[in-house]
Amino acid sequence: MLTIEKLEEFGVDTKEGLTRCMNKETFYFRMITMGLSNDSFEKLDAAIKENNLDEAFEAAHALKGVLGNLALTPIYKPLSEMTEMLRAKKTADYAAMYKPIMEMRNQLLEMIKS
């Protein structure tokens, strides 16, 4: 079960996230569930595998906004760095950068399910 305490242990800035969700915990949890279920995660994965930096940027940028609004800092920070690298079309091992992001996403999804 998702709790404020679990999110804080994970490194989430729950105070900011709750503020953006009108301090309604149930609403915040619902938005987190929706944000982590965003299909842009899969779009980003596919674009990285295809080495399509334009599509990867679009997906990463969309996720950056969602995750930032929810204050999911542990995922937001590395995704934000990746987004800026994609914006600049820098050569990088994006798959390696994306792997820990997906691992953290999956950890949060497990918290929701349990």
Image (cartoon, grey):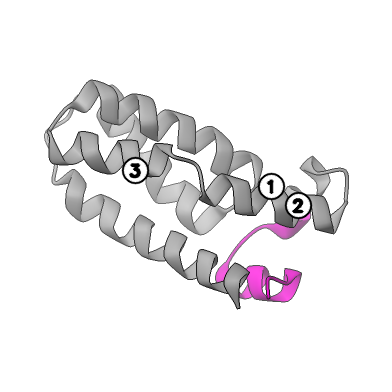
Is the residue 111 above or below the residue 65 in the image? below
Instruction: Report the span colored magenta.
Output: 1-15
Amino acid carrying label 3: it is Glu
Sequence order check: which comes first, mark 3 or mark 2?
2
Work out how far the residue at label 2 is from the one at label 1, CA to CA, in angstroms.
5 Å
Left or right, 74 with respect to 114, comes to left
* Residue 5 screen position, x and y as percent: 72, 75
- Picture coordinates of residue 20, whole percent (x, y): 78, 41
Residue receiving disc 3: 42
Please tell me whether residue 76 is drawn above or below residue 40 in the rendered image: below
**Image quadrant in which the N terminus is located:** bottom right
On the rendered structure, is 34 left or right of 29? left
Q: Are marks 2 and 1 in contact (CB under 8 Å)?
A: yes
Label 1 belongs to which residue? 31
Residue sticking out furthest to the right = 23
Specify the amino acid type for callout 2.
Tyr
Residue where numbered disc 2 is placed: 28
Residue 13 lies in the magenta-colored region: yes
